[in-house]
Amino acid sequence: MVANQARQLAVDLITSDFGDLVAKVCKCLLKKGALPLARLAMETELPREQLKKCLLVLIQHNCVQAFQTKKEVGGRVMSTTEYTALLDDIIHRLRFPKFLILIRDQFDEQCECLLGILLSHGRSTFEQLMQRLFENQPEVSGDITDQMRTRFAKLVQARYVERCPASEPQLVLDSEEGTITKKKLKEIVTDEERAVMAAAPLEAERFSFPTYSDNDASTESEIMADQSILVGEKRKRGVMEMDDDSIVLACEKDVLWRANFEEFVCSLRHKACIANVRPRLDIGAAVVLEAILKETRAKEKQNKAEYSAPFSMNSIVQALLGSPHGHLEHVRAALNQLGASCTGATEGSYRISLKKIIEAAQNSEMESIVLKRYGSEGCRIFRLLADKNGMIEQKQIPNLALIETKKAFELLYKLMKDDYLQMEEVASAQGKLFLWRVNRSSLQEKILNDMYHAASNLCQRLAHETTEEHELQLLKKNRITELQEKKVDRIRKVKPILEASILRLDDSIMLFHNF
Amino acid sequence: MAPSPSGLPGLPRPGPRSNMLAHDDKKVYEMIEKSGNKGIWSAEMKKYIPENILNKSLKLLLSKNLIKLVANVHNPRRKVYMLANLQPSEEISGGTWYSGKEFDTELIDVLKQHTLRFITKMKVVILDKIADSIKTSEILKVEVRIQEVKQVVDSLILDREIEAVLSNGSAEFLSIPKGKVCYRCRKMGHLEPASFVSVPCGVCPVINECTPDGVISPKTCEYYQRWLDF
Ligand code: SF4
């Protein structure tokens, strides 16, 4: 159910960025799953050439992944290329403004600029990036390019930028190098996930961007790459036997880069945790959590990790040296508030449940939705059942929530009609019992679906206003009527509201889907 | 408590009274008597006695002030009867929170506000102390029972105004024995309005009917029109 509205939102985003034709192709892939070119041509009724162009746009912008499958037909092995749309990655387009702000805050405006080019042009080599960056400048000094190279290396090192995945990986059911193993495949269900998995570069390669080293001091990313070779990636040896400068040159010319959405999501997740803790606990707890997440970032391996990576109390005190919240006593109290637990592995090593923080944030978001939609009494009933985390018999509810019986029952049925509560009828010796509860996972799914729907509606409205604006702008200046002028004025006021609402709503979508 | 009309003491004395009744009336009386302070629904009695006879009997018993019709707060439309000298059980009357058939929202609000003020003043406090403060405030005309105070406190918890915590016996909990449940105000009482419900679709009653090119669509939507009216 969620996928329906999410797909519509993805189509809206592609329409507004690349137009109707590309959106048509994308919509078809989202609806039908992975398809080979011939089927896609049939479904979309587009001429081959046009279809190919659309696919190229989608691949260039990391919205579609191609992959090859081999099938045996009449004793001959046939290989076909199929295309699959990457729903989550398409929806990330909604958050590009957030990604850019994040980079500006963490690095600087030039880094933001580099990322901006990667986001708006899709996959690019470093050389292409530089060309686009200095497009309108006749002469660019080597110094400036060097500075940009350093910045780019920083982005790669911080994992915000990664090497692009293979363009057409093969999906084969064996453990050959470069393909996915059977065991991994078992856990993966969709073509989309299989293709992404098969296309992903090896971890060490993914973030390696060798740079010219003036004084033979290797950059960290080079060291990382070197280490990985020791660990046994033999097939890269050939490349590494070239002299340093040619590696760098080859890398800048040939390697395609793109933004690594996973890392952005992870950073935004951390930010959301900190922002949630601040009002719920206090600023001290928020500062300590921020320090912990910064300290342990490099060790965090998994997306949506349930726990922070382990840390020691001492490392946090060190990290907060000089801060008013950094005394041992403060840190200890904050860890207590944050519910830090011992990892058990090594003594004095702690971890924080990020999942719990996210769940608390999700709960208060759901409550706030119920409060607005059903008022304080409706919200009280909802909280009663949510806190209970089990069933409550109908007759007890008015008393427990301290609400008049008739009103309480009305609210219960209203909440059930809108899928916020569930009720089960059970026969008992005293007659029928009506047992009520909150089904958290299905409710979250429902709310998420509605949020995608709302976001899609906002996007459509924004597109509608923009079209109207363009039409009005086409009119000759002197022939514009007063009414039309008013319209233009209104659109100018309305658009920023719609844009801001989309971004704010997306915070909630991320909270329920990506965190 | 309603005194029995005949001036007899509160306990029912079926013998002499029902003896004076005709057979059917007696049967109805006994059924009602057996239902005790929970009362009996007229539809229930119809299963055993034909409706016209039942109605006549009920009329008679009512006119003799032997039985009474009581308000059932859960099912206001049901006619529930019990002996005239009995006090309806809380299940029927709704207890302290009802005055007659009416739910006393005002009383509850006053009690909640009083309790919240008291907890704010005291920082951390146990249930007994809250009950004492309600007693001395004389907001309630009747005896305050601890379970009612607990109800008020629980409803403040559901409003996220206060929270229940266990005393650790030190610092702010110094005066409270370790391990005892006590109450304090929540740091974050009020919720930020969710972004979802600050756009029209978040509270829209027809969201399931709304499609990109349908009759109801974001391009022509009335709710948007009002929201973006400048
Ligand atoms: S666009 Fe209008 S009609 Fe459609 S869901 Fe939103 S508020 Fe409702």
Image (spheres, rainbow, N blue to C red):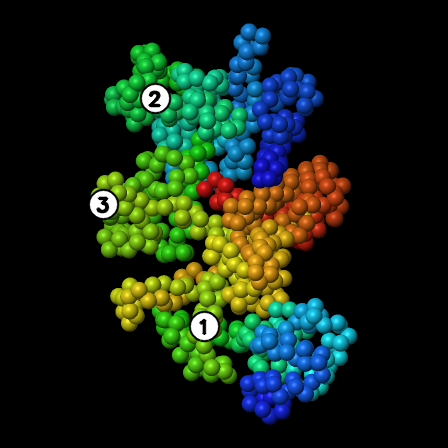
Residue A420: tell me if it is visible.
no
Under mark 2, the amino acid is Pro
Marked residue chain, label 2? A
Indicate the quadrant where residue A299 lies.
top left
Looking at the image, is mark 2 or mark 1 nearer the viewer? 1
The type of residue carrying mark 1 is Gln
Q: Are marks 3 and 2 in contact (CB under 8 Å)?
A: no
Nearest the viewer among A14 and A329 is A329
The image shows a total of numbered marks equal to 3
Residue at image x 73%, y 41%?
B214
Q: Position of residue A227 (x, y in %)?
A: 28, 22
Q: Residues within 10 Å of mark 2 (few under 14, many from 20)?
A: many
Q: Quadrant of residue A6?
A: top right
Is disc 3 placed on a helix, strand or loop? loop
State the residue position of label 3. Answer: A348
Does A333 sit above or below residue A65? below
Element at label 2: loop
| Ligand 1 has an atom within 8 Å of the beta carbon of the residue at disc 3 | no
Of the pair A475 and B81, the residue shown nearer to us: B81
Q: Residue at x 56, y 27 (%)?
A: A85
Q: Which residue in the rendered view is the most extreme toward the top?
A: A75
- Which label number is shown at residue B147? 1
Q: CA distance from mark 2 to mark 1?
A: 72 Å
Which chain does the residue under circle 1 lie in? B
Do marks 3 and 1 share a subunit?
Answer: no
Q: Is residue B137 left or right of residue A318?
A: right
Amino acid at dot 3: Gly
Return the residue at label 2.
Answer: A210
